Amino acid sequence: MVFALPVWVDWDRQPVSVHGDTLEQLEELVLHLKQQHNLRKRSLVMPDRENGGFVFFLYQTCDPRWIAEFTQRG
């Protein structure tokens, strides 16, 4: 599955929040982080009541390049 991914990450908040337009898009990102980088400590993907779209939270260290590689895949 290929996305044009308008994902944005708020690295300045604790926990870090990851935002996207669709539930499916963020669930694919969660799966990528879990399978490729063993990232397990995160929230469920949920509606973003403040900004619209969807959001999930990271509760462990995540390298920004991991998200970039997912958003730039073809």
Image (tube, rainbow, N blue to C red):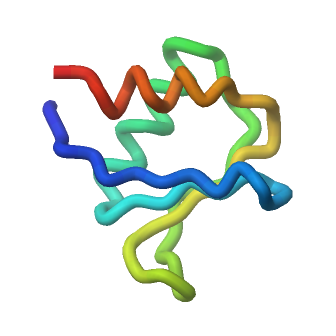
The residue drawn where x is 85% and y is 57% is 14
- The answer to whether residue 24 is left or right of residue 19 is left
Q: Residue furthest front?
A: 12
Q: Position of residue 4 (x, y in %)?
A: 18, 44
The residue drawn where x is 65% and y is 17% is 38
Residue 68 image-quadrant placement: top left
Residues 22 and 6: in front is 6
Q: Position of residue 48 (x, y in %)?
A: 51, 77
Residues 12 and 31: in front is 12
Residues 59 and 5: in front is 5
Q: Position of residue 49 (x, y in %)?
A: 53, 87
Q: Position of residue 26 (x, y in %)?
A: 41, 49
- State how many labels appear: 0
Quarter that holds the C terminus: top left
Above or below, 15 against 52 in this view is above
Above or below, 16 against 65 in this view is below
Residue 2 image-quadrant placement: top left
